[in-house]
Image (cartoon, rainbow, N blue to C red):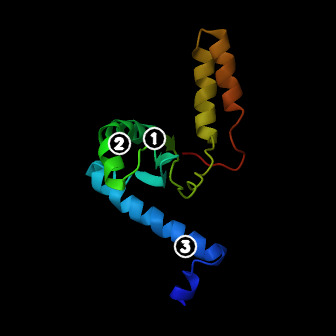
Amino acid sequence: MGETLRRPQGTLGRLMARADRLNRLNRIFRAYLPPHLHDHVVLVRLDQDDWTVHADSSSWATRLRYALHNIRETLGQQLGIPLPKPRVRVVPPDFPPRPRRPRLTLTQRNAKLLEVTARNVPDPRLSAALRRLAQHAGASSGAA
């Protein structure tokens, strides 16, 4: 089945050949890349027309730019093509969404403390703000 999919005729065969070429280039690229960057960058395209690498954050992109400057000529010689100036793009990895935190509620006890504090604060604007906050106490919340 694998040989059938890799036949050069047809769209799928061309796509598989392109993926194989990119994997081969990625292995060569990683051999020249400093080890601390391996987990933070992905080679997207590498040929004489375009050289694109994705980094997972702006700080890794900066480190990558310095590294690419040092390896560009040697890598081009290894591949036998003149490499253009590399393009580095920041593409954050996909993370699952954070779980939502439960909504905070103001207890009746804390609302009373806010009201007492509001009566004893000399600043009228702060006192009014504390009173407004105290009004947000949940009717069903218990004492904390």
Residue position for label 1: 86
Q: Secondary structure at mark 3?
A: helix
Looking at the figure, which quarter contains the C terminus?
top right
Callouts 2 and 1 close, C-beta under 8 Å: yes
Q: Secondary structure at mark 2?
A: helix
Alpha-carbon span between mark 3 and mark 1: 25 Å
Q: Quick check: 14 above or below 106?
A: below
Q: Disc 2 marks which amino acid?
A: Arg
Q: Secondary structure at mark 1?
A: loop
Quadrant of the image occupied by residue 28: bottom left
Please give left or right for residue 135 compared with residue 53 in the image: right
Mark earlier in primary sequence (2, 3): 3
Q: Disc 1 marks which amino acid?
A: Pro
- Farthest bottom residue in view: 1
Residue position for label 2: 72
Q: Position of residue 42 (x, y in %)?
A: 44, 54
Mark earlier in primary sequence (3, 1): 3
* Residue shown at 51% from the left, 43% from the top: 90
Q: Position of residue 93 (x, y in %)?
A: 50, 53
Q: Position of residue 31 (x, y in %)?
A: 29, 56
Residue position for label 3: 16
Looking at the image, which is closer to me, 123 or 26?
A: 26
What's the mark number on residue 37?
none
Looking at the image, which is closer to me, 20 or 37?
A: 20
Pointer 2 local density, CA inside 10 Å: few below 14, some 14–19, many at least 20 = some
Q: Position of residue 50 (x, y in %)?
A: 52, 46
